Amino acid sequence: MGPNPTSASSTPSYGRLSGAELIGSCPVLSEENPMLEDPAPFKPSLRHAWPIIPGAAILAAVAYLVAIIVTDNCIDKKISEVTYRDNNILGEQCRAIEREVPWHELSRKLRRCRRHEYYDPLHDDCQKCPAATPNDRVFAVFWESQKDCSRLVEEVNTKYVTHVYWAFATLSPTGAVSQSLQYWNDTAIMNCMSELRMRCIKQLISIGGAESRDSFFALRDEKALDLFAKTSISVVKKFDFDGIDMDDESGNQPQAQFKWKETQAPVVFKYLTALRKGLDEIQVPDEPRYLLTWDEFPTSLDGPDEGYTGCSLVTDGGWFRCYDKKITPLLDWVNIMLYNIAAGDGYAKMMNRRIPLYWVPAIGADKLLIGACSSLGCVEPVPPPGQSYRNAYNGSVLYKGSMLWSATNDVLYDNGQTMKTMGQAGNYGVRMPFRPLEV
């Protein structure tokens, strides 16, 4: 048989202590004895101080980081030329405003400033924008008004932009210019303009566009031309634009008897003269002169060359015409729509031969903006990589600057990379005055 499980020999002895003795040897917590006490007194030593060292290091690192962020009263001089409304708080990476500024309050303050001024949120006042100089370089971008313009305001690469062409105010067959931009709300556009003006970015209304090209032939009628001039000036006053960019894309079409320079260029001279006069009449004495610019095809100064008839070429679309030098004195500058030169040799001929030999004598190097396109703004054939960089660099070094069609496509589809590339290539951007804070 096996051992009896209840026998004394199978019961553990626990050092020969009885059950009562085992319980009595355990400490019991009570109201009189709330905590266990170590009978040995605590003796502090250096080995107990080791947490102080890493704690001090962490505290020093945090203090150093805060010091970097809050340097010079929260003004980083490298980025102080740009002011944004971010998360309902004015300032870029800086909270020196000390409180949130709701849009209704900011818009009221922006309206206090005049066309040539910007609102400075750090000082809560209006200050004059830098005056234009002959050495200024222009980086102008088109914004197509069918897209939300807040994307342009919020885009960080807008800091390179000096001028915005708002596209478009269309032209009716009667000669009347639309008093609203295409496809979008007037108030929203005015709000975007107000915020861009905080960075002294000048803004022009672009009148015309490809959809309106046939309507420009109606301006041969004197009444239509007068209506065109009046409604052009009225839209400038309504939005408080800094001028007009004329995107007249008429050409050697049947309406021009396939000879644009002979039949339509005199009409262009008349309406540009009327616009220049109208803009000068509404100018306030102590404000800068309103701008008047012109968009031109890259072939418009081409002469005959080896079977190519040049600017007098007649095509099905009528996308050729010969530039009339008589309009040059009326203009502040000309935007060469230099897009879609697919071959490298074609681009080299344009930059090395055609512009210096034909464009500069006709218009002047100080009145030429070299155009580029971005993403979906490029019509086939798409230009080779690097052309926008070269256009921006050459425009800055040799001419008045560069132009981009369009910032809309670039911001929405390319994250503003073309604006960044061109802005850095030409060292573009408005240099805002630095105003120190009173300490």
Image (tube, rainbow, N blue to C red):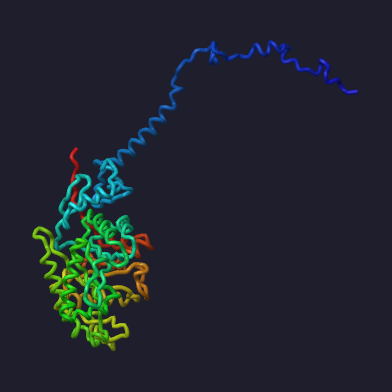
Name above or below for residue 63 compared with residue 267.
above
Residue 219 is situated, as x and y percent measured from the top left of the image, at: 19, 79
Name above or below for residue 367 compared with residue 195.
below
Q: Is residue 254 left or right of residue 288?
A: right
The N terminus lies in quadrant: top right
The C terminus lies in quadrant: top left
Quarter of image, res 196: bottom left
Residue with the most extreme right position = 1
Residue 332 is situated, as x and y percent measured from the top left of the image, at: 16, 68
Residue with the most extreme left position = 285
Name above or below for residue 85 compared with residue 224.
above
Residue 262 is situated, as x and y percent measured from the top left of the image, at: 18, 85
Can residue 171 be seen at all in this image of the molecule?
Answer: yes
Q: Is residue 8 left or right of residue 291?
A: right
Instruction: Please report the residue visible at 16 percent of the width from the left and 70 percent of the height from the top.
Output: 230
Residue 424 is situated, as x and y percent measured from the top left of the image, at: 28, 59
Q: Nearer the viewer, residue 205 or 391?
A: 205
Q: Nearer the viewer, residue 128 or 219?
A: 219
Q: Nearer the viewer, residue 122 or 435?
A: 122
Q: How many marks?
A: 0
Can residue 392 be seen at all in this image of the molecule?
Answer: no
Q: Is residue 223 left or right of residue 249?
A: left
